[in-house]
Amino acid sequence: MRSPGITASIAASIMASITASIMASVALCGTPGVASARPHTADPAELDDRDFWRDLIEPHGAAVASILTRAKRALGRAEAVPPDADGAVDRRHHLLDDAYGMLRYARTLSPDNPEVLRLLGTTADELGKTRQALDALEHCARLDGPDRAGAEVTGRLGLIYLRLGKLDDAVRWLGYAQGPIIVGDHASHAVHLATALAARGQMPAAIDLLINALPAQINYFTEPLTAVSFALAVSYDRDDQPGAAFEVLDRMQTTLQQEMAPLALTTLTALPFAPAEDRYYYLAMLYEAIGDDIEARAEWALYAAVTDAPWRRRALDHIQAIDAQRRSRPAIHAAPAAPAGPHPVP
């Protein structure tokens, strides 16, 4: 068994060797005429030293880089699978599972590699492996601190905790993920933070967050602007301010005209809702805005069918209002049928 004294002596010797090498290089560069004579070319021994220290710091660097390339290729193929293709779910799951296995192995080789941890966490979450996702993503966030981990890491953590109903954790992580909504996934992070704040009883804060996220003047709606605008309308509606809610939707309708429904459907389809039943609420608001009461009532009914949904009463209010409006419309009577038999000759 090696004694502490011997270990310390070896370490000191290595450090002394490194220091001497550095000092010699500095002295050489400072010698008149030497540096200007010709550019420095590393000799094979120096290259071997560099390889030694690189391998000491990251002994499996080349293997991890190769694994990352293959895992990213699998993830890209999974993302490109058309959702309506035959066997799309199984195909996507297979590709994600392949990437997940690669990334797990990469983590054994490089436990503190942020890129490995980020991809491992997001892939695990896509596969429904919540515990593994939290483990990898929180480890990633601890490496440089949550304010430097990046919105992809902190936003995903916030979304997972929002799905789990752990609102304090969701608000904390999503707070780190906020940024201009036209960049990356910041629009969905803003929507999720507003949802978490509202569920925690802070609806005014949720509404202020969404108002401040939107530009003062909107000349055209992109998907990020559409997502945040719909979230604002939903928040007003849940706060018993239906007039303010439909004012937001009317502005969208005025700007987008016939493009509102397809743009909104595309946006809401891509938005990862948490809780999942919020998708019904958003779609119901959309169908009411474009005047499709039948579809709106169906979506409100789906939301109201979730007995512990936090805004179930508002959904029932909408159903009642739609039913009352339909009852108040004048009945359209069909014209009396012509009598049977031969027509009289004029």
Image (cartoon, helix red, strand yellow):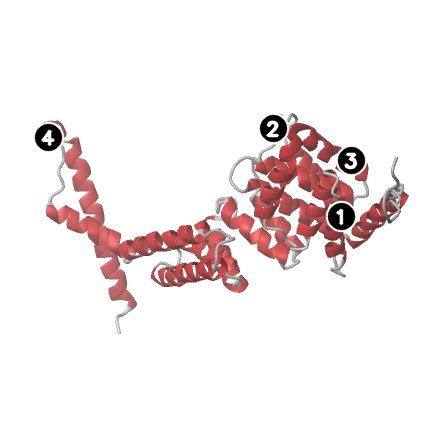
Label 1 – label 2 distance at C-alpha:
28 Å
Cβ atoms under marks 1 and 2 closer than 8 Å: no
Residue 116 in sight in this render? yes
Label 2 – label 4 distance at C-alpha:
60 Å
Labels 4, 3: front one: 3
- Graded by Cα atoms within 10 Å as few (under 14), some (14 to 19) or many (20 or more), the crowding at tag 4 reads few
Q: Earlier in the sequence, mark 4 or mark 3?
A: 4
Residue 131 % position (x, y): 53, 64
Quarter holding residue 208: top right
Residue 211 % position (x, y): 68, 34
Label 2 element class: loop
Q: Earlier in the sequence, mark 3 or mark 1?
A: 3
Quarter holding residue 61: bottom left
Residue 196 % position (x, y): 67, 50
- Graded by Cα atoms within 10 Å as few (under 14), some (14 to 19) or many (20 or more), the crowding at tag 1 reads few
**Residue found at x 87% / y 42%:** 335
Give the residue type at disc 4. Arg
Label 4 – label 3 distance at C-alpha:
74 Å
Q: Give the residue number, with chain letter if any, for mark 1.
A: 294
Where is the C terminus found, in terms of image quarters?
top right
Quarter holding residue 249: top right
Q: Earlier in the sequence, mark 1 or mark 2?
A: 2
Left or right: 169, with 75 as reference point:
right
Q: Give the residue number, with chain letter if any, for mark 4.
A: 38
Q: Give the residue number, with chain letter if any, for mark 2.
A: 220
**Residue found at x 62% / y 45%:** 268
Label 4 element class: loop
Front-most of residues 2 and 320: 320
Q: Give the residue number, with chain letter if any, for mark 3.
A: 244
